[in-house]
Amino acid sequence: MLLCVTASHKTASFEMLERLSRTPDDVAPNLLRLTSCVQGAVVLSTCNRFEAYVEVDEPVTAAGAVGVEAVLEAVEQSTGIPAEQLEGAYAVHSGRRVAEHLFAVASGLESVVPGEGEIAGQVRRALKAARKDGTTSPELERLFQRASQAQRKVKNVTAIGRAGRSLVRLSLELADSRIADWSAERVLLVGTGAYAAVTLATLRERGAADISVYSPSGRAELFAKKHAITAVAEADYARVARASTLLITCTTATEPVLGPQQLQGAASTGGAGCPMGAPTSGSQLVIDLGMPRNVDPEIANVEGVALLDLETIRLHAPLEELQATDAARSVVRDAADTFNVVGDRQSVTPAVVAFRSHILSLMEAEIDRARARGDEDGRVEQAMRHLAGVLTHTPTARAHELAADGRGAEFIAALETLYGISVADPAARASETA
């Protein structure tokens, strides 16, 4: 059975998501060590989401509870967050609902700003990390691969990608109300990862030209050379920060990389409470796209500094951006239905094979007896093979129909009752009884 334990901006506080975003890489390995019924685990951790996808091999109705308990214990072991503190901060999807949820997540439909494209790459990287750690399973592989296919179809056949805007783009749109001329801004970019590249491209789209980059991890020179901007050395960081009018942080650092100590002495007029209105001469705008926070919240108390963080960005997302299009949802549902039908058919396949093998073995025994009685022209054998095909056709078709309706367990139970055939694949039973 597939299971998903998810904490996102829809279920958890910003502070809890910030703590979960520091999740170490050992959550999935811990999950597999905690209980033998967990066959595979893939962990997806982003700035607004923590999700554990688990395959549970447990042919009992308690499989879901066992899996959730294992996830919470693994999170506690890895992060130190007690399970009781997570109460109310997560939701659980199981069985057939898991595929639709992941497909929607991968397509950006569950993001702070629906349609944002960064999540698709994060989903792919989550599977890659699980492969590296040896924690994935065949069914989780199939789930995540189909999620990427669904995401591409949503992108290609719907307008959700054009309607939705990434966090980077939305943050700069919110900054528009303060900036009259982007070409006049002195921009300092703090960070050199994937978000930094997206941020830089978006800044240039808006006309920004005076852009510098500082990297807490020492990668500024390489990033600056690649993108033709100015690198800032550690010794010059505070000085350049004070001289900049727009500072954007987007690093994976687990501690703040920008605080009052870097900006104290910045010239300003207007004060920390300056609203997001017309540009104010000498003021600074700090945009924090980091999770955990890259910026010390106390920076908002520095005179002349306005802080725009992910929590504020989320609150300002236009309502129309928070509503995924019907077309995109329809694509996701269809893809999830196909995934589940294929999975159900695969799960009932051992039973179908066992049934057909049973009938064919009876047929072969009767053919041998017919030959012994002198079936020289083979007509009896031909008739019996035809009859066996007729006898197995309808039950086989019915097994697939039942599986498509999520009722494959009925076919398996009927085989045991009528023929005494026991299917030796417990995983098939678990997926059908969950």
Image (cartoon, rainbow, N blue to C red):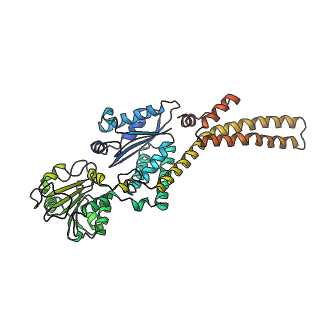
Q: Nearer the viewer, residue 384 or 18?
A: 18
Among all residues in the image, which is located at the extreme left?
Answer: 265
The image quarter in which residue 258 lies: bottom left
Q: Is residue 409 left or right of residue 256?
A: right
Q: Nearer the viewer, residue 202 or 258?
A: 202
Q: Nearer the viewer, residue 99 or 333?
A: 333
The image quarter in which residue 27 lies: top left
The image shows residue 264 at horizontal and vertical percentages of: 10, 56
Which residue occupies 31% across, 59% down?
A: 170
Which residue occupies 56% across, 49% down?
A: 338
The image shows residue 259 at horizontal and vertical percentages of: 16, 52
The image quarter in which residue 316 lies: bottom left
Q: Is residue 388 left or right of residue 195?
A: right
Q: Nearer the viewer, residue 114 or 46?
A: 114
Query: How many marks overall?
Result: 0
The image shows residue 28 at horizontal and vertical percentages of: 40, 41
Among all residues in the image, which is located at the extreme front?
Answer: 319
The image shows residue 311 at horizontal and vertical percentages of: 27, 50
Vertically, is 345 above or below 109? above
Q: Is residue 407 left or right of residue 318?
A: right
